[in-house]
Amino acid sequence: MTVIIKKYYLLLILAALVLLPLASPALFSDYYLDLFTKILIFGIMLLGYDILAGYTGLVSLGHALFFGLGGYCAAFTINHFSSNLAPVLAVALIVSTAIGLFVGFFSTQTKDIFFVFLTLAFAQFFYLAAFNMTGITGGDNGITIAKATIGIPSLWTTKIPRPYGFYYLALVFFVLSFAICRRVINSPFGKVLVAIRENEERVSYLGYSIRKVKIKSYMISVWLATVAGVLFAAYQDFVSPGMLHWALSGDLILMSVLGGMGTLVGPVLGGAIIILLGDELSSLTENWMIFIGGFFVLMIIFAPKGVLGVLSNIRWFRNHDA
Amino acid sequence: MDFSALITTILHGLTLGMVLMLVAGGLTIIFGMMEVLNFAHGSLYMLGAYFGYTVAHLTGSFWLAILIAPLAVGAVGFLIEFFSLRPLYGRPPLHHLLLTFGISLIVQNAIKFIWGNDIYSIEMPAFLSGSSSLLGVQYPTYRLFVLLFSVALSILIWLLITKTKWGVVVRAGTEDIETLEAHGIDTRKVFTAVFVVCAAFAAVGGAVVAPMRTVYPQMGVDIIIEAFIVVIIGGLGSIKGAVVGALILGLATQLGAVFLTGFADAAIYIVMAGILLFRPSGLVTETE
C-alpha cells in the first residue's frame, strides 16, 4: 500500500508554512519559528532518508555521518574560506559525494541487518575521528562558526537574518527537496527502488544492476543529509561530534517509522511530532524520551505503518485518485 | 612493549570478551530462535547492574546482588517477551529491532528517573580485591574472578544447550522452528523461556562487572553496540560465532588501546568493517 497525499493538501500546508509566520507573532512566536526551522531542516534529511530506507529498503544506522559531515564542512569553509552559503554548500557536497561514494560502495555489498551495522561502523569511525582529533575539530567542545551569509559576492550579500531569514531559507530548501524526491519516486527509477525493496532477485533478473541503483539511492539521501547538515550548522553557528553520533541516526529511524516509512510526507510528519512533542514534554520531565519510547513501542505493535498509515485509514484523508 | 604488559593486555581483552559473551551469547540465541534482534538486551544488562547495586547497597552482600539481579531481570524479560515481542512474531526482523529500540529508550529513561544520572559502584568482596600474580604478572584478582566466572557461565550455557533435553529443543528451534512445532512442542513457551534465561545471563553480566566498570545510565547502549558487533562479525545466530566474535572484539579493544592511543575506540569499528567487507555474513556461517 502506498499512501500519497493529494496535491491539494500539500499546497494548503505549504501556504500555511509560508503565511503563518507573517500573520502574527502571537500565532507563531519566535520560539515556534525556531522549532519549525529545525523541523524543516530535519525534514530535508528525512526526505532523503526515506528514499533510502523507506523506498529502497536499506535501513542505515549511520546517516548522521553526512549530517555531521555537512556541519563540519560548513564550519571549516565559513571560518577559513568564505561565509557565503553557495560555496559552503558546494564544498560540503563535493566532500560528501566522495565519502558517500566510498561508504555507499562498500555498504551496499551487504544487506538487511549487515547493512545497518556496516553503515554504523563507518559513521562511528568518523564520529570518533571528530571526537579525538581535538587539534582540528576541537573534540567534544566542537567549533563555533561565524555568521553565514547569502547573496552574490561584490554585488550584494547579507548575513542571513534570524529568525525569519533562516526559516524561509530552510523552507525553500525543504520545498525544493520535496519536489525533487517526489519526482524521483514517481519516475521509473523510483519504481525500481520499490521493486528492489520488495524483491531484489526479481529485479536483477530484469537486467538491472542492483548495486548501481542502490548506490544512486544512497547518494540522494547523502546529498540531502549534507544540505541539512550545512543548514543546521549555519543556523546553530556551531558543530560538535554529536551531529555525527549514531544516536542521531537512531532518531532518524524513530521519526521515519513513527510517521510512516516510504511515504515522503510520513517521516517529515514523524520528525515534526518528535521535535514538537519532545519540546512540550521536556518542560515536564528531563526523561521525556520515556514517553516517546512508549509511544513508539505502541505504534510498532499496533500501527507499524506509522501515523500517516493511521490517517490514511480515515476516509477524509484517503487519496481517491491513486 | 614488554612481555608482562602484553600478558596484562591480553588478559584484559579476554575478560572483556567473556563479559561481552554473556550479552552477545543471549543476543545470538534469541536471534537464532525467534529471528528477533533484541536491541533491549543491553538494557537488561544495565538493569542487572542497577538491581545488583540496589541489593548490594541494601544488604551489603555482593553474592546476594549477583543472585537476585538475574532473577529480577528475568521477570522483566518475561514481561517484555510476553507483552511486546509475542504479538510481533512472524513480522520482518526490522520490526523487532525497532520495537526493542523503543523498549531500550523506555528502560534507559526509567533508570534515569529512578536512580538519577549518578554513577554507582558495587563493592567487591574483600577477598577478591587486590591483585594476584599470574604468569609473572600482577593482575587484579577481581578481573581474574570475572574472567573465570564468565567462562564458567559460558560453559554452563554450553552444557545446557548440548547436554540437556531443553538444549535439544533450543538447538532444534534455531534450525527449523516449524518442524519443532510439528513435533508437538509449544514453541511459544520455549520462546518465553529462552528469552527469560538469556535476559538473566545478561543481568548477571551487568552485576558482575559493576565493581570494575561502574554503573551508569549509558552502559546499556554502550554494551549493546559492542554485543551487536560481536554477533555480526561472528555470524548472526551462531553461538560459536559469538564466542569467536567476543574474543576478537575484546582483544581488539584492548590491543587498540595500546597501539592506537587516542583512537582506541575506533579499533572495534575497523575490525568490524574489515570482517564484513570480506565476509559479508560474518565469520561463522552455518550451512543451511
Image (tube, coloured by chain):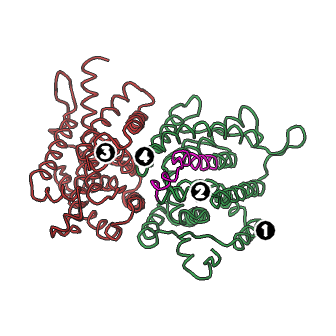
Q: In this view, does B150 lie to the left or right of A35?
A: left
- The CA span between labels 3 and 2 is 31 Å
Tell which circle, 2 or 1, labels the residue nearer the N-terminal end.
Answer: 1
The outermost residue toward the bottom is A315
Q: Residue A214: within the magenta? A: yes
Q: Which of marks 1 and 3 is in front?
A: 3
Q: Which chain is indicated by disc 4?
A: A
Chain identifier of the red chain:
B
Q: Where is residue B113 in the image (x, y as percent from the top left)?
A: 41, 61
Q: Do labels 1 and 4 share a chain?
A: yes
Determine contact: label 1, label 3, CB under 8 Å: no
The residue positioned 19% from the left and 43% from the top of the image is B150
The outermost residue toward the top is B2
Determine contact: label 2, label 1, CB under 8 Å: no
Residue assigned mark 1: A19
Residue assigned mark 4: A117
Say few, some or many: other residues with alpha carbon within 10 Å of mark 2 (under 14 / 14 to 19 / 20 or more): many
Camera-side residue of A282 and B70: B70
Q: Which quadrant of the view contains residue A267? A: bottom right
Q: Split into 4 quadrants, where in the image is the N terminus of chain B?
A: top left
Q: What's the magenta region?
A: A199-225
Determine contact: label 3, label 4, CB under 8 Å: no
Kind of residue at badge 4: Phe
Chain identifier of the green chain:
A
Tell which circle, 1 or 4, labels the residue nearer the N-terminal end.
Answer: 1
Q: Which of marks 3 and 4 is in front?
A: 3
Q: Which chain is indicated by disc 3?
A: B
Q: Which quadrant of the view contains residue A87? A: top right
Camera-side residue of B113 and A193: A193
- The CA span between labels 2 and 1 is 23 Å
